[in-house]
Amino acid sequence: MKLRKIISLEYVIAFILTVFFYAHLDFSWLSFILFLLLPDITMAGYIINLKMGALCYNTGHSFFIPAILLVIGYTLSIPTLLMVALIWLAHIFLDRALGYGLKYDEAFTKTHLQQIA
């Protein structure tokens, strides 16, 4: 199996696990559907220029912020934070499974996943 396929499969599994925990916590499926694509609003940074676009996109598509929200939501028992974090992570995992990685500021189409595989 090629490395790119292995990486994609890993992200599919992560997406499925995220959806499993979302369902287990009995969160709203309407919210999941409505907000799943919300992180893509960060592409609006490309209206300014490539560098700002990559910065905005990568901020919305890295694991850092949703992981922190997940830990805070779990530690402090704040269901809304857990829900937001899981939807956000599901979006990132789905994007990565489809081959959309973090962006370099040279071009929208140049991603970190291309460098890996």
Image (cartoon, helix red, strand yellow):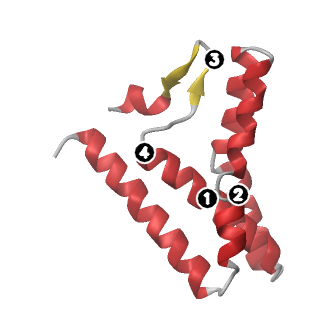
Task: Please say if the residues under marks 4 and 2 sit with CB atoms less than 8 Å apart.
Answer: no
Task: Please say if the residues under marks 1 and 2 sit with CB atoms less than 8 Å apart.
Answer: yes
x then y, percent, for residue 90: 57, 60
Q: CA–CA distance between discs 3 and 2?
A: 23 Å
x then y, percent, for residue 99: 42, 39
Image point (70%, 57%), residue name: 66
- Observer-side mark, 4 or 3, equals 4
Q: Which residue is mark 1?
A: 89
Q: Which residue is mark 4?
A: 98
Q: Amino acid at mark 4?
A: Leu
Q: Which residue is mark 2?
A: 66
Q: Secondary structure at mark 3?
A: loop
| Residue 82: quadrant of the picture | bottom right
Upstream in the sequence, badge 4 or badge 1? 1
Q: Which residue is mark 3?
A: 105
Q: CA–CA distance between discs 1 and 2?
A: 6 Å
Q: Secondary structure at mark 1?
A: helix
Image side of residue 47 versus residue 106, left or right: right
Q: CA–CA distance between discs 1 and 3?
A: 23 Å
